[in-house]
Image (tube, rainbow, N blue to C red):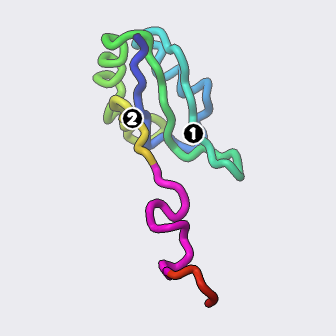
Amino acid sequence: MAKKLYVGNLTYGVDQTALEGLFTAFGTVERAQLITDRDTGRSKGFGFVEMASDAEAKAAIQGLHEQEHNGRRLIVNEAKPREERSGYGGERGGGYGGRSGGGRY
Protein backbone atom coordinates (compact mmCIF):
# COMPACT_ATOMS: atom_id res chain seq x y z
CA MET A 1 0.00 0.00 0.00
CA ALA A 2 1.42 3.39 -1.02
CA LYS A 3 1.91 6.04 1.65
CA LYS A 4 1.34 9.67 0.69
CA LEU A 5 3.70 12.29 2.09
CA TYR A 6 3.46 16.07 2.20
CA VAL A 7 6.64 17.94 1.24
CA GLY A 8 6.79 21.62 2.08
CA ASN A 9 9.16 24.60 2.09
CA LEU A 10 10.55 23.72 -1.35
CA THR A 11 12.30 26.39 -3.35
CA TYR A 12 10.40 27.59 -6.40
CA GLY A 13 13.13 26.14 -8.62
CA VAL A 14 12.36 22.53 -7.67
CA ASP A 15 10.64 20.68 -10.49
CA GLN A 16 8.81 17.34 -10.60
CA THR A 17 11.97 15.38 -11.45
CA ALA A 18 13.97 16.96 -8.62
CA LEU A 19 11.15 16.28 -6.15
CA GLU A 20 11.06 12.62 -7.12
CA GLY A 21 14.86 12.44 -6.97
CA LEU A 22 14.90 13.55 -3.33
CA PHE A 23 12.91 10.48 -2.33
CA THR A 24 14.40 7.71 -4.50
CA ALA A 25 17.21 7.16 -1.99
CA PHE A 26 14.57 5.93 0.48
CA GLY A 27 12.68 3.53 -1.78
CA THR A 28 10.32 3.31 -4.71
CA VAL A 29 8.48 6.51 -5.56
CA GLU A 30 5.04 5.60 -6.88
CA ARG A 31 4.14 9.20 -7.72
CA ALA A 32 5.51 12.70 -7.20
CA GLN A 33 3.29 15.74 -7.64
CA LEU A 34 4.49 19.32 -7.41
CA ILE A 35 1.65 21.76 -6.74
CA THR A 36 1.65 24.73 -9.10
CA ASP A 37 -0.31 27.94 -9.43
CA ARG A 38 -3.24 27.48 -11.80
CA ASP A 39 -2.68 30.79 -13.59
CA THR A 40 1.11 31.11 -13.75
CA GLY A 41 2.23 27.48 -13.66
CA ARG A 42 4.82 28.46 -11.02
CA SER A 43 5.49 26.13 -8.11
CA LYS A 44 3.67 26.91 -4.87
CA GLY A 45 6.59 25.52 -2.84
CA PHE A 46 5.02 22.23 -1.82
CA GLY A 47 4.02 18.87 -3.21
CA PHE A 48 3.13 15.28 -2.46
CA VAL A 49 5.07 12.05 -2.87
CA GLU A 50 3.67 8.54 -2.69
CA MET A 51 6.11 5.88 -1.52
CA ALA A 52 5.58 2.19 -2.26
CA SER A 53 5.45 1.10 1.40
CA ASP A 54 4.98 2.42 4.91
CA ALA A 55 8.57 1.51 5.78
CA GLU A 56 9.92 3.53 2.85
CA ALA A 57 7.70 6.47 3.76
CA LYS A 58 8.94 6.42 7.37
CA ALA A 59 12.55 6.26 6.16
CA ALA A 60 11.96 9.25 3.89
CA ILE A 61 10.40 11.27 6.72
CA GLN A 62 13.31 10.45 9.04
CA GLY A 63 15.88 11.17 6.35
CA LEU A 64 14.45 14.38 4.87
CA HIS A 65 12.35 16.20 7.49
CA GLU A 66 14.17 19.35 8.69
CA GLN A 67 17.05 18.68 6.28
CA GLU A 68 18.37 21.57 4.22
CA HIS A 69 17.74 21.55 0.47
CA ASN A 70 18.76 24.53 -1.67
CA GLY A 71 19.04 26.71 1.43
CA ARG A 72 15.67 25.80 2.96
CA ARG A 73 14.68 23.30 5.64
CA LEU A 74 12.27 20.76 4.21
CA ILE A 75 9.03 19.80 5.90
CA VAL A 76 8.20 16.16 5.27
CA ASN A 77 5.36 14.36 7.02
CA GLU A 78 2.44 12.08 6.38
CA ALA A 79 -0.17 13.80 4.22
CA LYS A 80 -3.51 14.41 5.87
CA PRO A 81 -6.76 13.75 4.00
CA ARG A 82 -8.14 16.78 2.22
CA GLU A 83 -10.83 18.57 4.21
CA GLU A 84 -14.30 19.00 2.76
CA ARG A 85 -14.96 22.53 1.58
CA SER A 86 -18.47 23.88 1.43
CA GLY A 87 -19.57 25.47 -1.82
CA TYR A 88 -20.44 29.10 -2.32
CA GLY A 89 -23.07 30.12 0.18
CA GLY A 90 -22.81 26.88 2.13
CA GLU A 91 -25.81 26.26 4.31
CA ARG A 92 -26.77 29.92 4.50
CA GLY A 93 -29.16 29.97 1.59
CA GLY A 94 -27.11 30.64 -1.52
CA GLY A 95 -25.27 33.84 -0.64
CA TYR A 96 -27.97 36.45 -1.19
CA GLY A 97 -27.01 38.59 1.77
CA GLY A 98 -29.16 36.74 4.28
CA ARG A 99 -32.42 38.47 3.35
CA SER A 100 -35.51 36.41 3.76
CA GLY A 101 -38.95 36.69 2.22
CA GLY A 102 -37.77 36.53 -1.40
CA GLY A 103 -39.53 39.76 -2.31
CA ARG A 104 -38.15 42.84 -4.00
CA TYR A 105 -35.11 44.63 -2.73
| As drawn, 95 above or below 36 | below
Q: In the displayed structure, does residue 78 sit left or right of residue 90? A: left
Label 2, secondary structure: give it: loop
Residue 94 percent coordinates (x, y):
55, 66
| Image quarter in which the C terminus is found | bottom right
- 88 magenta-colored: yes
Q: Which residue is mark 2?
A: 81
Report the mark closest to the observer, 1 or 2. 2
- Front in this rendered view, residue 22 or 93: 93
The residue sitting at 63% across, 48% down in the picture is 37
- Report the amino acid beneath label 1: Ile
Q: In the displayed structure, does residue 82 sit left or right of residue 39? A: left
Q: Which stretch appears magenta?
A: 85-100
Q: Which residue is mark 1?
A: 35
| As drawn, 82 above or below 37 | above
| Image quarter in which the N terminus is found | top left
Residue 99 percent coordinates (x, y):
50, 82
- Front in this rendered view, residue 54 or 22: 54
